Image (spheres, coloured by chain):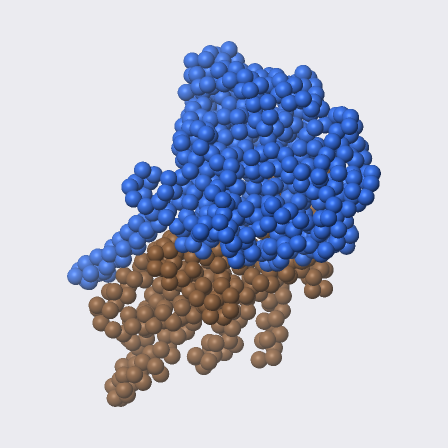
Chain colours: A brown, B blue
């Protein structure tokens, strides 16, 4: 176990190094200059451009700029935003909370509704299966921004049950404000998890060990929880781990639609503005989150299926 | 699902029903009925199509205090509130209420004393400003001449890289305190525009010692500001909101704010802004998206106002070798355009055709002189396909296609580009539209090397900071000028612009500008102006009072006029 933790850590660091290099190179190669965004496209004199380029080290070669950034990170310095002129850490700090809350909320909705609906669909009769399958089709087919518009129009503008925008304050206020965005975000993932759950439950039901358990007279509830679900949970947990990646990507659409100030909206804006330090910092966070979650899912397998060793 | 015929029937109809419900709900709510639908909403003040006569400078006066309001900035979050870096709508909308300038631009676009009690021009190259006494910064420190000198001089510093430096401070020789409450600015050549710009953020004053202490972080969320205005910067959470609160010690007793606290949001997505306004979560906004206009016109939650405006859209040309370098082709294109259609369709009736950079909304003085010049120009510029085709033939009927750069993220710009393309094809010119994401098109406009890939650039929004047509002439028509993308050069035009810049007599100045426009726009079509569009202001029914026009709200402390409508 000690060896595998060290191996995981080494893997994380290598992944971070490679991805940070790729992201930096991609932004460097992409056409555009942050100075253009600083001045909002308003042309300035060549002297001013030279001045700003020098101040933000934009004229230095790629290697030196990447190295400067890397050494800064290793000292715990995320750098200063070119566009906002404030430390990247103060730009990101408040937004991390919003995005984390949103993603966790959406993920809980996905797990609870997706697994429940999928299991129900798998074990109940044709009518239930039909209704739930129809629902998941709509959920899979609906783009996130369409879901956002419909949810805002119905539940916020017409019914006034939720605010139309903003992340709210205080724990209860935040959960209230993040409900519609979480639902919009969770729709696709929930449908996907429901489908996979349904298939794996149905697959489990056909297995001999389940027939044997039933044949031995064990109560149906016990068979369901201790035999069917234990078996079905492996593919289900893999899928729920993967949906986190799609949730992180989905925040890029959901956050602007609901006027939420989170990492997704900041990432889009910073890429457009070529705000290098901010893009690098957010990429690091996203890659770390993704790797950590995958490792956590990996660690879950032996608990579900002792045949799998790490 | 083989072998499940009846199941497929249930399934299919359930899916269809679910989608149908979603579509009906999405489309019917939110008031998507077009203008002209009966019921609900109030007539938009200022909405006489095709005329600026109804555009208003002010909204009905406020009647009482309000403790707090939420205001949106649809163009996004300010990047910095340092006046030297504030030359765009998000920054100036906020800054106008915080930092004051030497001269005050009123909502009626006249000049009044601001932080000066008077100013004079003892000779053409000298401006003397008498600083108002008894004014204090938010921290209680008094405003003195040294603060004024320090603040103005920052615009000359290369390390500050002020956005106002070029062209407005290029004639400045020295800025000196000539008394504890007097500042004298000496110029290298006669310049009246410098004084006019002292009514904008170019002339905004902050406390010298505070600015020095904060250095590069002045104006950022971390460094804050130290100014004299009716509101103070209370807090700024980047990405989330910016809060300003009433200054209890504000010097101007005639302009005491009624709103205690204003929270600025940075929502840019058009449907989110619309939903926020319609649901009442946002109390007001300037520059509401065009796409929101039909909904907001109908809404009973508040009122949409069309304000007086110096905003315009233009076609700019580059230095790319090709047919567009021939003035005959540029004039032909201008003659072929149907500006009225663009004004009605693209701008939902909130715009009027404009034929020159000195369109009527910019006439802050010598109106009848400008009227004469503009009328003469319009006569030769009104839509005339026959004349346009003749010019194309005269230019040799070029077959080479022209490329036009448009920001893909702006549906209005794309629509306008299609009108231009269609007008061109009617006279035998081919235009290929290059739709490019907004961020990239901004970069291209900014970079002289990248621009050259395109013949024409569709430029959506320009606006005058001051009611003086010479401003855009200075920006676009002189060699080396910042917006002179096509390197337009005409010695006489250049001379006339410099002369006009130094001429105090309004009629003489207007005459010179008429000459400039007749040559540069009328004959040479250095740039093709399309429309002048109104400012779009929406306020919740519970509040009123905000000035409705641009550039008024960019430099006048508009928030001090806002209050409750009851």
Residue at the image position 25 percent from the left and 67 percent from the top:
A129
Residue at the image position 67 percent from the left and 22 percent from the top:
B505
In the foreground, A101 or A233: A101
Left or right: A293, with B136 as reference point? left
Q: x and y percent of residue A290 in the render?
A: 53, 65
**Figure check: B14 above or below B455:** below
**Figure check: A272 above or below A132:** above
Q: x and y percent of residue A136 in the render?
A: 32, 62
Q: Does residue B171 appear in this view?
A: no
Q: Quadrant of residue B180?
A: top right
Report how many numbered discs are placed on residues in the image.
Answer: 0
In the foreground, B390 or B519: B519
Image quarter (top left, top right, bottom left or bottom right) of the N terminus of chain B: bottom left
Left or right: B45, with A288 as reference point? left
User: In the current view of this chain or complex, which residue is farthest to the left?
Assistant: B6
Residue at the image position 48 percent from the left and 47 percent from the top:
B544
Q: Quadrant of residue A212?
A: bottom left
**Figure check: A230 above or below B374:** below
In the foreground, B23 or B504: B504
Q: Does residue B17 appear in this view?
A: yes
Q: Quadrant of residue B185?
A: top right
Q: x and y percent of residue A112 in the render?
A: 38, 72
**Figure check: B468 above or below A276:** above
Q: x and y percent of residue A164 in the render?
A: 43, 57
Residue at the image position 21 percent from the left and 57 percent from the top:
B13
């Amino acid at each position: 176990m000690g060896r595998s933790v060290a191996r995981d850590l080494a893997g994380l660091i290598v992944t971070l190094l490679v991805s940070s290099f790729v992201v930096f190179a991609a932004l460097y190669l992409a056409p555009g200059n942050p100075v253009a965004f600083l001045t909002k496209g308003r042309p300035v004199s060549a002297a001013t451009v030279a001045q700003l380029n020098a101040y933000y080290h934009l004229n230095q070669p790629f290697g030196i700029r990447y190295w400067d950034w890397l050494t800064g990170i290793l000292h715990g310095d995320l750098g200063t935003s070119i566009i906002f002129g404030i430390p990247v850490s103060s730009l990101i700090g408040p937004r991390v909370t919003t995005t984390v809350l949103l993603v966790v909320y959406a993920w809980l909705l996905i797990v609870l509704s997706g697994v429940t609906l999928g299991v129900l669909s798998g074990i109940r009769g044709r009518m239930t299966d039909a209704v739930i399958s129809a629902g998941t089709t709509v959920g899979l087919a609906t783009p996130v921004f369409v879901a956002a518009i419909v949810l805002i129009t119905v539940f916020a503008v017409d019914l006034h049950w939720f605010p139309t925008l903003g992340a709210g304050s205080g724990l209860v206020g935040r959960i209230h404000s993040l409900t519609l965005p979480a639902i919009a975000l969770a729709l696709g993932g929930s449908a996907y998890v429901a489908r996979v759950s349904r298939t794996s439950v149905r697959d489990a039901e056909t297995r001999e060990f389940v027939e044997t358990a039933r044949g031995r007279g064990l109560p149906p509830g016990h068979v369901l929880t201790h035999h069917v679900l234990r078996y079905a949970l492996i593919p289900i947990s893999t899928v729920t781990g993967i949906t986190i990646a799609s949730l992180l990507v989905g925040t890029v659409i959901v956050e602007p639609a609901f006027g939420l100030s989170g990492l997704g909206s900041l990432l889009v804006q910073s890429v457009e503005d070529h705000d290098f330090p901010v893009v690098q910092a957010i990429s690091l966070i996203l890659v770390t989150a993704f790797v950590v979650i995958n490792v956590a899912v990996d660690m879950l397998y032996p608990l579900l299926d002792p045949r799998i060793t790490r | 699902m083989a072998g499940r015929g009846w199941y497929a029937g249930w399934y299919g109809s359930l899916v269809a029903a679910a989608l149908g419900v979603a579509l009906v709900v999405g489309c019917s709510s939110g008031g998507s009925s077009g203008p002209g639908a009966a019921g609900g909403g109030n007539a938009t003040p200022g909405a006489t199509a095709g005329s600026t006569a109804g555009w208003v400078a002010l909204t009905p006066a406020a009647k009482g205090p309000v403790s707090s309001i939420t205001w949106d900035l649809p163009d996004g979050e300010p990047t910095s509130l340092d006046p030297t870096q504030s030359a765009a709508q998000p920054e100036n909308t906020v800054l106008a209420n915080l930092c004051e300038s030497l001269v005050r631009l009123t909502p009626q676009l006249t000049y009044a004393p601001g932080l000066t009690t008077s100013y004079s021009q003892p000779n053409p190259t000298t401006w003397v400003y008498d600083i108002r006494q008894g004014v204090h910064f938010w921290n209680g420190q008094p405003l003195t001449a040294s603060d004024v000198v320090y603040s103005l001089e920052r615009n000359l510093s290369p390390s500050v890289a002020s956005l106002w430096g070029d062209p407005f401070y290029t004639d400045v020789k020295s800025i000196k305190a000539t008394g504890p409450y007097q500042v004298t600015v000496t110029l290298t050549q006669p310049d009246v525009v410098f004084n006019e710009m002292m009514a904008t953020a170019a002339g905004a004053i902050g406390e010298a010692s505070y600015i020095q202490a904060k250095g590069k972080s002045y104006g950022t969320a971390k460094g804050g500001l130290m100014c004299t205005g009716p509101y103070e910067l209370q807090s700024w959470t980047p990405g989330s909101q910016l809060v300003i609160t009433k200054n209890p010690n504000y010097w101007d007793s005639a302009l005491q704010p009624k709103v205690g606290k204003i929270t600025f949001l940075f929502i840019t997505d058009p449907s989110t802004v619309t939903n926020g306004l319609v649901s009442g979560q946002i109390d007001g906004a300037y520059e509401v998206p065009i796409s929101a206009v039909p909904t907001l016109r109908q809404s009973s939650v508040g009122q949409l106002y069309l304000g007086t405006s110096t905003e315009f859209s233009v076609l700019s040309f580059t230095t790319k070798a090709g047919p567009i370098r021939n003035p005959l082709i540029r004039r032909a294109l201008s003659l072929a355009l149907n500006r009225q259609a663009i004004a009605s369709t693209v701008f939902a009736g909130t715009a009027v055709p404009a034929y020159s950079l000195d369109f009527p909304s910019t006439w802050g003085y010598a109106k009848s002189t400008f009227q004469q010049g503009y009328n003469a120009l319009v006569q030769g510029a009104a839509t005339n396909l026959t004349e346009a085709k003749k010019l194309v033939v005269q230019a040799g009927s070029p077959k080479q296609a022209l490329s036009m750069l448009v920001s893909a993220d702006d549906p209005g710009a794309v629509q306008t580009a299609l009108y231009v393309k269609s007008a061109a094809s009617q006279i035998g010119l081919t235009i290929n539209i290059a739709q490019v994401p907004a961020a990239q098109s901004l970069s291209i406009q900014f970079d002289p090397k990248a621009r050259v890939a395109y013949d024409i650039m569709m430029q959506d929004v320009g606006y005058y900071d001051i009611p003086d047509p010479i401003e855009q002439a200075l920006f676009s028509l002189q060699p080396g000028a910042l917006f002179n993308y096509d390197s337009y050069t005409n010695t006489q035009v250049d001379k006339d612009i410099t002369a006009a810049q130094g001429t105090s007599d309004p009629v003489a100045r207007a005459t010179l500008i008429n000459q400039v426009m007749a040559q540069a726009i009328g004959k040479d079509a250095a740039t093709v102006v399309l429309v002048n569009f109104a400012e779009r202001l929406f306020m919740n029914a519970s509040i009123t009072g905000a000035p409705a026009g641009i550039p008024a709200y960019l430099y006048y402390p508009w928030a001090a006029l806002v209050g409750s409508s009851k």
